[in-house]
Amino acid sequence: MKKLFPKEIILETTNYCNLKCRFCHFHGLSSTPVRPKGYMKETLWQKILDELSDIQHPIILCLHGAGEPLLYPKLKKLIKQAKTNPMLQVGFMTNGMLLTPEWSDFLLEEGIDWLAFSVDGVKPETNNFFRRGASLKTVEKNIFYLINAKQKKGLNTPHLSFNMVA
């Protein structure tokens, strides 16, 4: 019997975040989270990846949710394992603050397929107002490092996109 799989799967690796965005339903100053903060158990994502091992069509695997994925202590291990499945298009949404050169080099080495950056405005005062705790200059520096490293290596991925809420 043929197994049916969705076209996109979201794994909320963590709901911890390093920012307190004004509009965030989970971390904003006026939010009232109804579930505790934590990290996804490795046994859970291992089980999910095992179940996806025999898929026959591409699936977008999103490693984000109500938190910042780069805070997840086992993110590197998860990405390495997910990238062994050629049918998974692996990526995540990030605020970019924690995307150090070391993280960028790791993501390029592992062949991450896509990254989505959450920014709000092209001026620091706009972005930093909405994304409390962020620095647009830091985010830009981190993204430019990634882009330059990607170009130096002659890579086509990760595909980059940018999200704005405000």
Image (tube, grey):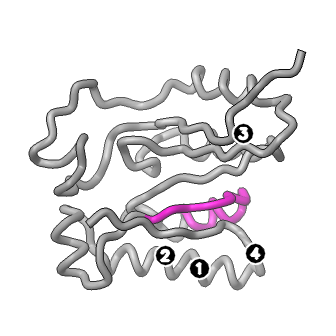
Disc 3 from disc 4: Cα separation? 21 Å
| Disc nearer the start of the sequence (3/4) | 3
Q: Foreground residue, 22 or 140? A: 22
The residues bearing labels 4 and 2 have C-alpha atoms spaced at a distance of 15 Å
Res. 49 visible in picture = yes
Secondary structure type for disc 3: helix
Q: Quadrant of the N terminus?
A: top right
For the point 42% across and 65% down, which residue is it? 163
Residues at marks 1 and 2, CA–CA distance in whole angstroms: 6 Å
The residue indicated by pointer 4 is 155
In the image, taking residue 112 as reference, residue 99 lies left or right, namely left
User: Where residue 138 sits in the image (x, y, percent)?
Assistant: 35, 76
| Residue at the extreme right | 1
Q: Which image quadrant: the C terminus?
A: bottom left
Q: Is residue 18 magenta?
A: no
Q: Which mark is residue 81?
A: 3
Which x, y percent locates residue 64? Answer: 48, 45
The residue stretch that appears in magenta: 103-117
Determine crowd level at label 2: few under 14, some 14-19, many 20+ residues with C-alpha closer than 10 A. many
- The residue lying at 36 percent from left, 38 percent from top is 15
| Percent x, y of residue 77 | 63, 41
Image position of 88 with respect to 99: above or below: above
Few, some or many residues within 10 Å of mark 3 (<14, 14–19, 20+): some
Report which residue position mark 1 lands on. 147
Answer few, some or many: residues within 10 Å of disc 4's Cα (few below 14, many 20 plus, some between 14 and 19). Answer: few
Amino acid type at circle 4 is Leu
> Dots 1 and 2: beta carbons under 8 Å?
yes
Q: Tell which circle, 3 or 1, labels the residue nearer the N-terminal end.
A: 3
